[in-house]
Image (spheres, grey):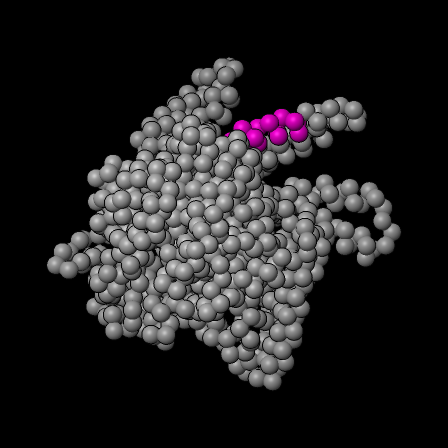
Amino acid sequence: MSDYPLIKFTILFIVGILIKELFNVPLSSASIIFAVSTSVLLILFFVNRRLKNFRLQPLLLNLFTIISIFSTGILYSHLLNDMDVEYPLDRERIKDVIIEGELIGKELPKEKYFDFYIQCDRIIIEKDTLNEKSNFLCKIKRKSVNDIPFEIGSIIRVKGTIQKARDRRNPFEFDYNNYLKKKGISGLFYIAGVSDLSIIIPAGFSVDNLIFTARISISKQINRMYSFETASLLKGLLLADRSGIDPETKESFVNAGVIHVLAVSGLHVGYITIIFLFLFSRFNIYVKNILTLIGLLIFVLVTGAPASVVRASIMAGVLILSSFSIRSYSNINSLAIAALIILVFDPSELFDPGFQLSFSAVLAIFIIYPIIRDWIINLRIQNKYVRSTILFLGVSVAAQLGTLPFTLIYFNKFSLVSLVANLFVIPLIGIIVSLGITSLLFSPIWTFIGILYAGTTELTSDLLILIVKTIGKWDYSYLFIRQFSLYDGIVYYVTFGVLYYILKKFSSIIPKLIAVTLLIITSVFFVHLDNEDILPQNILSVVMIDVGQGDSFLIKFPNGQTALIDAGNATPSFDNGERVIYPLLQNLGITKIDYGFVSHVDSDHYRGFEFLVGQGLINTIYKPKCDSTKRLDVEFENLINESNTELKYYNKSIMHIGTVNIYILNEIDDNRLIRKSSNDMSGIIKVVYGSTEIMFVGDAGRQVESRLVKRYGKFLASDVLKAGHHGSKTSTGDEFLNVVAPNITLISVGQFNSFKHPSKEVIDKLNSFGTKILRTDLNKAVILNSDGNKVWQLDWL
């Protein structure tokens, strides 16, 4: 490494960026550290001759060099990425807004939307004008326009709805708003139609428009030649556009441990480089190499320059250029060059998943694979095909060991079948990329050959997806690893480094075993230090899950059993059961819901259960008696019966779940209300733990509330009330509220809902009563805990 100082510089530069991000080092402090350390270095160099006999001189030089370089990383990160990217308005969603600014980028067309980016100069809301420099992701529905009619660089005026992106609404959920902020985007802007777009100043010539024209031409050509599924795969492999790949297919790739092949990466750059070298093989070595470098540059630009492609292309370029030099090629040095170039342009790339996965995989192959290779060679396997296969698997093992922390952080899954899957998938991906490029090259000049290659690509693509879906759906194809953090990742890499040192340091087996055992025990201890269980043991916990305009409440009882009251809505575009509740259960380590309670069969309460029931995640479901005149109710019961989930109907009873009592307050004669209102058939559930009580009323209206007061009187008194019908004025009557007398009132309601829930009348009433109001639209998910004596709110954010 001493021959390659750039490696050391890059490592320290990266450490500086990390320190700035993790510890939020102020710009002023970074400037002082940089100024002092560089000044000391200059002084040391200046008086170098006079301090020749000073023993600490090399130590001081090294120390202040290290401080100078990592302070450079801190300072540089501040200078390039210290923009104050925030949503610029007080209201999170405003209609009929006009923004003016420069069109700075366009995405390839998606299934439903065209996406483009505006760097706005002005925001106009009614008669008010705000001069604001912010970037917005704009979306216009494809059914209203065939293309974005303006070029990148145009100054345009658009009218629509401005909105803050969804942030983390539930524990462990993806924070889309933070993701956009890291990319310099302040918010979203939805446009109804092309009539809401107008141009102020047209764009001049730009390279960006040439690149986008090339990308859109290739995309259209792929769409013409291939089926939707194969076209979506090819656009992912060649253009870094995975928007067309359906979620189920992506999930199969994750489960099989081969999601990396869907990103344009070093694997694809390798194939592209080989293709270019073959095409230019008739030229002399200098012309061939220069043309290949130009081809790689074009490929980087056409793919949109993701970090993995830039990394691989720089490394390939360094390898090609080394043929002109007398210096030997160093894998790790070229990797350091690639990292430094990318981070000089944008230090925030260090926190991009593509950057992390790409560099950790390649670094692990360079460091770990030689050890694995030597071990395999020492086995002296005679059959060359078996030996080659095992060596190939060795590369895969090394890459997975390197990327494991990032894979667990972003996907929470450890694939048990990835070695088998990679054995088939990687060669197939190479064939698909090669055939796909060949078909695109031939189709304009020799249609028959283009179609022939396209047909072969289609068959290979079908085979690939069949293999991935088959392997990804195997039982126990992966382990779900919950709450794996950045801290855990650091412990992992430190452990791996110490393990490498132990294996090199000790020659005899006994010291190795002792050292490795102590290392494992220590690592397990440190990994558990940051674990935080938001639903503690031996406590009653209630989670009001934010499912938008709907209800869903997860209950964990002191004995570890669980219940789910409602599961929100499910539409063709978004299923709360699959996209919100199921991931939450996985991250909480809940594999089964013991009791499911469907308050009533309205879409915003029961539809999320369909996915959960279909996955066999619910043991028993309670619901109102089926109304045979309602098709959705009948279909839902058929689904329950087909899944072997036990079905029970609400009837006045007491359930004992450990030390918790659940009172179901519905009575059989309440069935006469069924023809009047499904809301009034809601299950009325009271949960009692010690001296604490929580009341759930679904969407029951005031008529039901009056009946409950007459029947149960003071028994209804509770510490917590789930307000009926999302805070609508049809519920939470005065008499009922006075009897229940809650200290806390929960309102599950969607942001910006069209029903204008909750009602101002109800909110004013609750405020006058003095109860603490917790709402999902304002407070996001809410977690309440009870020890049987008191109820308190847990701050999970």
Q: Confirm whether the magenta stretch covers residue 531.
A: yes
Horizontal side of residue 653 vs 782, given as left or right: right
126 or 663, nearer to the observer? 663
The total of numbered circles placed on residues is 0
Let me know if residue 37 is in the magenta part: no
Residue 490 position, x and y percent, is 55, 34
Left or right of 269 in this view: 375: right
- On screen, 401 above or below 598? above
Relative to 117, residue 222 above or below: below
Q: Nearer the viewer, residue 634 or 327?
A: 634
Residue 367 image position (x, y, % from top left): 65, 41
Q: Quadrant of residue 688?
A: top left
Q: Nearer the viewer, residue 328 or 217?
A: 217
Q: Residue furthest left?
A: 127
Q: Position of residue 204 (x, y in %)?
A: 28, 68
Residue at image point 38% right, 67% down: 114
Query: Of 794 and 506, which appears nearest the observer?
Result: 794
Which quadrant would the N terminus be assigned to in this image? Answer: top right
Above or below, 110 relative to 411: below
Q: In the rendered structure, which segment of residues is drawn in magenta?
A: 519-534
- The image position of residue 104, as x and y in percent, is 32, 61
- Kindly identify the residue that appears in the image at 41 percent across and 60 percent down: 672
Kindly report the secondary structure that dominates the magenta region of the rendered protein.
helix
The answer to whether residue 754 is seen in the rendering is: yes
Question: Can see residue 484?
Answer: no
Q: Residue at x 35, y 69 (%)?
A: 141
Residue 162 picture quarter: bottom left
